[in-house]
Image (cartoon, rainbow, N blue to C red):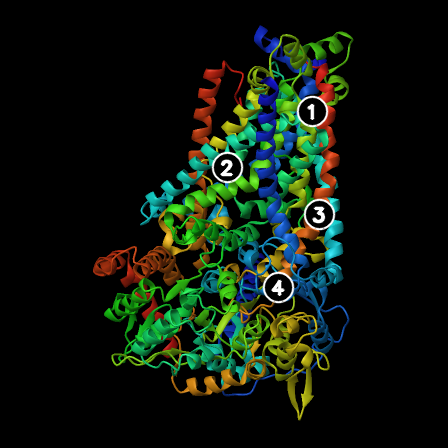
Amino acid sequence: MKTLTNATVRSGAARDFIKKLNSQKLLILMILPACVYFFVFHYIPIYGIIVAFKDFSISSGILGSRWVGLKWFYEFFNSYVFWRLLRNTLMLNVYNLMFGFPVPIIFALLLNEIKGKRIKRTIQTISYLPHFISVVIVVSIMNLLLSTTGGVVNKAVAAFGIEPINFMYEKSWFRFLYVFSAIWQNFGWNSIIYFAAIANINKELYEAATIDGANRWKQTLYITIPGILPTIGIMLLLRLGSLMSVGFEKIILMYNPSTYEVSDVISTYVYRKGLLASNFSFGAAVGFFNSVINFIILVASNYISNKLSGDTIGLW
Amino acid sequence: MKKVMSLALAGVLFLFVGCTKETEVAQKSILMNTLPVELTTDVAAPYSLPLEKNEGATLKIAAFENLYGAASYAENLPVWQEIERRTGVKIEWEVIPSSQYAVVMRTRLAASRDIPDIFCLPDDSMVPQLASSELLLPLNGYINEYGQHTKKLYEKFPEAYLLNRDQDGVVYTLSDVYTEGNTVKMYAALIRKDWLETLGLSIPETLEEWTETLTAFKNQDPNGNGMKDEVPLAVSTMISLAPFASAYGLHSAYSGFWGVDALGKVQYEVLTNRYRDYITYLNMLYRNGLLKFFLNDQNGRNLLVHQNSVGCTGAEMSGISQNYIKGLISAGVKAPQVVSILPPKTPSADIVFEERTSIARRVAVYKNTANPDMAFKWLDYVWGSEDANVLLNFGIEGVSYNMVDGKPILSDWTLNNPNGLDPASAVRSLGAFPSFLNVQNGEFLKQWSSEGEIEFAAKAVSNMAKPFPLQVILTNEETQILSAYNSDISSYFEEMQIKFIMGTEPLSKFDEFVSTLKEMGVEELTKVRQAQYDRYKK
Amino acid sequence: MEETRKKIKGLLLGAIMFTIVAMTLYPFMYVFSVSISSANAVLMQKVWLYPKGFSLASYKYLLHSGSLWTAYGNTIFYTLCGTLISVCLTLLTAYPLSKNYFMFKKFFTVYMAVTMFFSGGLIPMFILVNNLGIYNTRWALLLPGAIGAFNVIIAKTFLLGISPALEESAKIDGANDFRVFISIVLPVSLPVIGVLILFYSVGYWNMYFNAIIYISSAKLQPLQVFLMRLLIAGNQELSAGTDISGVERTGIVEQMKYAAVIITTLPIIFAYPYAQKYFVHGLAIGALKE
């Protein structure tokens, strides 16, 4: 180390750099495994992205296949249903964000108001349960409850004298059902992080507030919420960075051609296309398109968030 | 100097000769492998069992996982133990749940790493892609050399050959073959005969009679519970409406609406007026509450069936009506009767009663497998031989079947399984009725079907036609056309079809629908289908 | 007046919580009921909340299967080892990133965030796993997903909340960064450690896709692959071939999928309260902070 410093120090800036390097060597050492990990498992295989710009053939491999430029992107953009796919993908995500994002936070705050530790823990545990049930079973439960012939929901609706609703075939219901079931299945699980954030808040703050005569509501408003705000901000940023992603598994179980207009999303389209012929390049091109948009949204919202919060809430 | 020159020349010559010799050998084996399959002559070198005498012989096989999920092939199920014993070849299984199989195998093939000796293709349309990537072993030479059983099977069921050879006559794959079984398995309408009797109706034969019957089911309370809860016609897939499509001369069950006219011209039937009439009829049924959909929701349909509220349903029959009846009896229905009936007649079109597609799920040998002779012989025995066929269809003697008068007869254990398994699941728990290399034996299906079904099948046979040969192997160019056009077209078609039927899109838009389909490239698809058909007929 | 107000609030809160519990408990209750009802009741779909009839036949079948226990053992192994590796690496990574003065903070965050969006896809990943020589070994399930960028970011956010004063005093006493991390930071970070343990362990427990891609030997497969087999058998829409028994599957085969859900999830549910203690600990220790 010493010889290195002696040999390379020329300007003050470089000296500062070396000095910094030296003083932070333990921190660097700590992050080194992750650095290697991301390099090996994420950056080495990243060359696969070029498949999106090639006509992949198995015999020539990824590097040897013929370049076709933006052919697959054009094929995707020119698809008969491109705009519809884009709209549906975004809409499902926007609804999910609007309604799904606040629920775990509200739930965590409400549960925080419950006094008994035992009951609190029990409710917490129960709220995660749906997260462990596969979508196959979730959708079959939906079918069971929403059936027009003997489903509990339609029985309840009938009690008000309303005609049975054919939930799974009405396109007006699809988004609601998709988002609602997603929230129902995941809000408990997603609230874990907020429970932890609440637990992280210094208890003395509450004690001081109690002495000052602040009631529970005021404590929540002035201590709890600001305390978990950084977590909320980061979660929101990460969520915004996936606005273009919707998994196909649940949708293909839920949809049928009569609701394609609202239910067909980018991933289901690629899935159906992939069923017929194994076009690796097309799938890669669509994936790349999604990633770019997601990344742009994330970078933009990170910038805005940094601006608004004075550099306290941001990924970088 | 001269000496040196000549030496050098000799060296060069030697290298050259050496080279040509090698290429010659390589060429010879390729030639051997792609020679036309000689169906009529005997094989050059018949083999006998066991295939291998030494202990260590193994084959790595990648296949769809057992459809009876509680018993994995990897657990070395009895049927496959028996195969191992007979062939002397150990099987190293790599089984993958069927819904993920395509993704996993495609990745491995695309990476050209860790490819098993024998594998099911991730999807049946991948043959040209994989063959041109030198991943599949051409089997022609092996068939001529050792394919004693394969040849016999080809002779008996030419489809097994016709649908597995490519445009140059090279065979890369074997596949599931549905042989005589086709005559007891088809899309048919199942109707509640006891309901008909209650209402004093006879079996409907024309479309008008069908409408009347379904209307009567809806209005006259055939299940006698005093409520109008009957669903006259309940379907869980669009395909199960095939009997009605048949009445309009449409090939919907196994042909995807691809038909051929008398002159051998291929036609997408969705563009025709017959198709318009068909959806008009279905729209009428739907509007009048006679037809109800349970797409993606088979359980919902089955529930209604068992609640004694369904009058008619379409299904791929065989063994169904029995379970149907069993279900009704356990639900407390007295003496229920369910029968399969022929599609309705119309004056305007001949009834098209499609036979089941004859092949599925192709299986290939990896080109660089260590011992191609052994791999092929193994396949030939397991796929083609009568002995293995009994094992694969009926399972283990003394457990799932017994020999009676030299014929395998399913045992009571299979038909009335003490653990409550249906016959298919029961034999699958032993490893039989596999999800690949399945040459379905008609005898097996018959034994498990009800008498009514067999009787019906016998009646239906005279009306049956072969489905469109969608499985004829495509060329690389054809695959590209298909992948560019097909998914958009079929999505649009499916969407409009159900909208027309449910009335969310008026039928007056039918012409618009047809012209959109044309804009989307139906003609291109038609060319591909025509080429397929021509090759099939050649 | 104040008292009644409090009471009303309490009642309201109770009502909300009761609804939530009822709604979230329902699917599990349903799955459980189906798994232990009589096969006939399942076939007739009489079960929609509590069990009808009683039969453990589906469990008998599953527990009989030798591969279930192997798969169980594998999953426990992957979960324990994987969680240990992942949580350690994640915290080690998150700590330097939580220091504003760390010179590579911005670079590394972006370096890492990019991987959340861009990947080369399955084929190069498969080739890599092969070239590393870990294909079809246990490492193939432990290494490729060892660190989640998402989790590092979460951990970093939490570590940011720790009072710098705590660390300063230790540093004045001569402790280096690593010591501070081990003896000062970790003890006050129990809530986030709990979160990481929970996220990673459930991730490993539910690991499925990597297992079928990178593991070809049945002996190394985890539990979820076993479960998926059953779910798929019952879900023909997704399966590749034409199956003969699509319509008429009997009740018991249907029940097995439900029994399998119970068998695979019960351990997590029982293990969960232990992980949860960390939150409570965290509550107590929070007092040490800012």
Q: Residues within 10 Å of mark 3 (few under 14, many from 20)?
A: few
Judging by the rendered image, the residue that carries numbered circle 4 is C41
Looking at this view, is C249 or B489 the one in front? C249
Circle nearer the N terminus (4, 3): 4
Residue type (three-letter) at the residue carrying disc 1: Met
Question: Hey, which quadrant is residue A290 in on the image?
Answer: top left
Residue type (three-letter) at the residue carrying disc 2: Phe
**Is residue C234 visible in the rendered structure shown here?**
yes
Kindly indicate whether the residues beneath marks 4 and 2 are on one polypeptide chain. yes
Residue type (three-letter) at the residue carrying disc 4: Ala
Q: Chain of mark 2?
A: C
Judging by the rendered image, the residue that carries numbered circle 3 is C266
Residue B472 in percent (x, y) is at 42, 71
C206 in relation to B483, above or below: above
Q: Residues within 10 Å of mark 4 (few under 14, many from 20)?
A: some
> How far, Cα to Cα, is label 3 from label 2?
36 Å
Cβ–Cβ below 8 Å for labels 3 and 1? no
* Residue at screen point 46% across, 16% down: A308
Cβ–Cβ below 8 Å for labels 1 and 4? no
Q: Chain of mark 3?
A: C
> Residue A30 bears which disc, if any?
1
> How far, Cα to Cα, is label 1 from label 4?
58 Å
Left/right of residue B38 with respect to residue B199 in the rendered view: right
Q: Chain of mark 4?
A: C
Most extreme residue toward the bottom, as rendered? B405
Judging by the rendered image, the residue that carries numbered circle 2 is C118
> How far, Cα to Cα, is label 4 from label 3?
24 Å
Kindly indicate whether the residues beneath marks 1 and 4 are on one polypeptide chain. no
Cβ–Cβ below 8 Å for labels 3 and 2? no
